[in-house]
Image (spheres, rainbow, N blue to C red):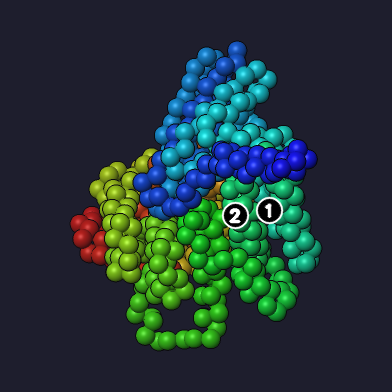
Amino acid sequence: MSQNSFIPLFAALMIVLFHHCAPKENIPEIKFDLHGESKLTFSNSSKSDVWIKFEKWSSIPVDYITVDTLIVSGADFQINLKNHSMDYIHWDLNKVNIDIFMLPGSDETITIYENDSINFSGGLSEINQFLYQNSKKDLSFNKLNHVRAMATHGEKDFMRFIEKSDSIHQIQLKNLESNKSQLPDWYVNLEKERLNYRNVASKMNSISYRKNMLKTEDEIPNGFMEGLIQSVQLENEKFIGESNYMLFLHEYGNFHSQKISIIETDSSDAKQSWMILKAQEIDKLFTGKVKDAYLAELTSMLIKNARSEYDAMVLNYFTDEELRDLIREYYESSVTLKPGTPMPYFFLENQMGEDVESRDYLGNILLINFWADWCKPCIEEFPHENALVEKYQGKPVKILNICIESNRERWKEYILRYGLKMDNLFAGENWTKKLKSSYDISGIPHSVLIDWNGNIVENRTKTASKGIDKLIDELLGEMKSPF
């Protein structure tokens, strides 16, 4: 063999050896882990104290924790987080919003230096460094979500609204593509897929919000929603628990429900609870792990926001025994304001400027309804609440509406506009925080039934439109009243 023919053969051999010897990319298994946890450490190596603040949400079951803490100079802060799936934490460092990527089992450390410069260490450090650079370019997820929200509220023309949403999606995809050389391939592919779910879910959610909350009559082209749905994979187990995928499942379910309500009617359904009807629908729409996961999320959401509407028969629709047990335990442990405990104290102002406190209602059965001026379902309760006032006139029953998270002048305006006959109180910012905490308010409308001794009968009880008067009538029958 000549020297000239040996050189290309040697080069080819070296290429083969290089590919065989090069370290393979460590690709994590992306899947839902009901028992998954991750560890996050903040290390303050700066000369100043720093504030760390974030919320960590979970989908299955629906829950969240809030971290709001000061880390003194030279100190570390470590926290173990429930982390069932791939997830992003959106945290504030001295009021600057930064995203952190987490996986079940991940162990990440964030070191903070002078001038809020940051170093990441751990198995996901390359990804989190990329996300940190995004925050400097105003490309954090919260920042872009705000732009989407502004388009949802402010753009009158439907196609312009869709164009703005798509432009945000393209910005994210191009940014990911231009930085892919510094990122693991598995993450780039995963994030592209996640961003597609995000784009579809946010469009579907915004269309629903514009219709139901903003009363915007969008002219949606024929087949538009179907096209959105078909652009992504419906059942995708690796995304179970991820917030955007779960939102997509939720919006897909809503879209299907609207179609069913138009084409099908069955008088026998009236005997079924809403929870069971929804479980039957989910059973038709999804299969396997995706079906059980979505049913678990929806059921836990109902328990958290409207506990009295829970129907234990829903447990029969679970195939996964672990998720079935989880929902059963979640329901049993979900009572934070237990029956028989004294109602939490309040001292608020009515529309005449008079001070009213909780003990003023002793001697009466009391139904408290928490609402806000932006909450359409709350406003839809007004006629039913007025009807309760009329029904129990002259009896020891008081209907009390407490307005939270609202504008004071608009509150007064609504009292007149809707002819509200019940007692009306307003909670400013500080009292709103106290009431949301003490009455465990995670969503509105939120109703609480209290007996004549000032003790809780049921928190998250039925609203006026759902038949709370039956329970009030039972209490009246039990009441040994001096009236």
- What quarter of the picture does the C terminus occupy? bottom left
Q: Residue at x 60, y 16 (%)?
A: 46
Position of 470 relative to 222 (above/below): above
- Residue 443, percent across and down? 48, 53
In the image: residue 235, left or right of residue 358: right
Task: Please state, as top left, top right, bottom left or bottom right, where the N terminus lies in the image.
Answer: top right
Q: Nearer the viewer, residue 366 or 229?
A: 229
Q: Is residue 356 above or below residue 155?
A: above
Q: Earlier in the sequence, mark 1 or mark 2?
A: 1
| Mark 2 secondary-structure assignment | helix
The spot of residue 177 in percent (x, y) is: 72, 48
Amino acid of disc 2 = Arg
Residue 421 lies, with reference to residue 242, above or below; the image says below
**Residue on which disc 2 sits:** 194
- The residue located at (63%, 25%) in the rendering is 118
Mark identifier at residue 149: 1
Disc 1 from disc 2: Cα separation: 19 Å
- Residue depicted at x 55% and y 79%: 259
Q: Judge by depth and name the residue closer to the eye, 426 or 11.
A: 11
